[in-house]
Amino acid sequence: MIDSHNRNIDYMRISITDRCNLRCTYCMPHGIKLAEHSEILSYEEILRICNLAVSLGIHKFKITGGEPLVRKGCVDFIARLKAMPGAEQVTLTTNGTLLEEQISDLCSAGLDGVNISMDTLRPERYRSLTAYAGEMPDIERLSALCIEKGLRTKINTVLLSELEDELVDIASIAERLPVDVRFIELMPIGVGKSVDGISAQIVKERLSARWPDLHHVSKNRGNGPAEYFHAQELIGYIGFISAMSGKFCDGCNRIRLTGMGQLRNCLCYDYGVDLRDTLRSGASDSELLSQMEACILSKPKAHTFSHPEQMKETITMNQIGG
């Protein structure tokens, strides 16, 4: 579907849960008030929305959370979504802690790709950053396993000032594996408003010192706004999602469905449509479609992350869908 600013909206990010087994310092360090199970959309409700989304021209879906793999039935849901006529691509974003034990089933379900979030390579920092009591995932071994299984694999690293000394080491994974290592500027959402981040430009300069021939590639390597770079020594690619320093709203192609059934057209604003209440009131498909179309058509021209005082979003990333 084409929105009012002539952008083709063909991608939906779906949060299937607000729950997560980590407590990252920039997301939900003290936890949040979790939604009641009855408030969260059922898989059947999500699939109904996805089927209508396909009719609007949305053919690519990203499953997120919270941590999506903590929700029982996630694998079966992915299988059902991927089997839906018109659902061309289904991918998953995960923190990796539960991925290895479910990876074979996810592949059998038809999953096309996986984004693994990992901000540090050091176990002591990982524990401090995430408050996770379990074993830190071995991101390189886990990525290699995903690649072996045929999954398009990306590593997502949020640019935190306290972890600046590790960025070259993380990027170096692309020397050894055909992965996309992506650096994401911290967005001023929720707790993130009070955490210090790093500009992507600073990181580009650091990485260019390590790989002097690092250069921009115009090849599209995904559904999102990342710009990618390559060097002769790299097997994979290095990407940057520069929400703060490099606004990419002109090419934004996405909408988001929260676990509680709100269809959001921009991370920066708290308005959208409440599909859950519409669904549960016995609405017809045409009524739901009308609300979805209106949400897409009202998608704003641009976010205001560079002016946090103008932001209207009040919920956190685990509630919206990371």
Image (spheres, rainbow, N blue to C red):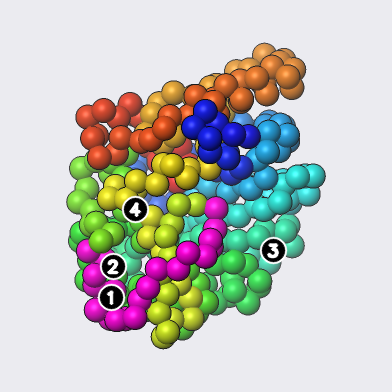
Can you identify the residue that label 2 sits on?
204
Disc 3 from disc 4: Cα separation: 31 Å
Question: What is the three-letter code of the residue carrying label 4?
Answer: Ser
Residue 240 in which image quadrant: bottom left
Q: Earlier in the sequence, mark 4 or mark 2?
A: 2
Q: Nearer the viewer, mark 3 or mark 1?
A: 1
Disc 4 from disc 2: Cα separation: 11 Å
> Can you name the residue that lies furthest to the bottom here?
233
From the viewer's perspective, is residue 235 above or below residue 262? below
Q: Earlier in the sequence, mark 3 or mark 4?
A: 3
Q: Name the one closer to the observer, 100 or 4.
A: 4
**What is the total number of numbered labels drawn onto the structure image?**
4
Disc 1 from disc 4: Cα separation: 17 Å
**Mark 3 falls on what kind of element?**
helix
**Is residue 184 inside the magenta stretch?**
no
Question: What is the three-letter code of the residue carrying label 1?
Answer: Ser
Which residue shows up at 78% across the image and 49% down it? 83
Q: Which residues are magenta?
A: 202-223
Which residue shows up at 22% across the image and 29% down it? 309
Q: Name the one closer to the observer, 315 or 241.
A: 241
247 lies left or right of 205: right
Can you identify the residue that label 4 sits on?
242
Please give the label number shown on residue 107: 3
Measured from the top left, where is residue 76 in percent x and y?
72, 49
Question: What is the three-letter code of the residue carrying label 2?
Answer: Lys
Measured from the top left, where is residue 294 in percent x and y?
57, 21
**Mark 4 falls on what kind of element?**
loop
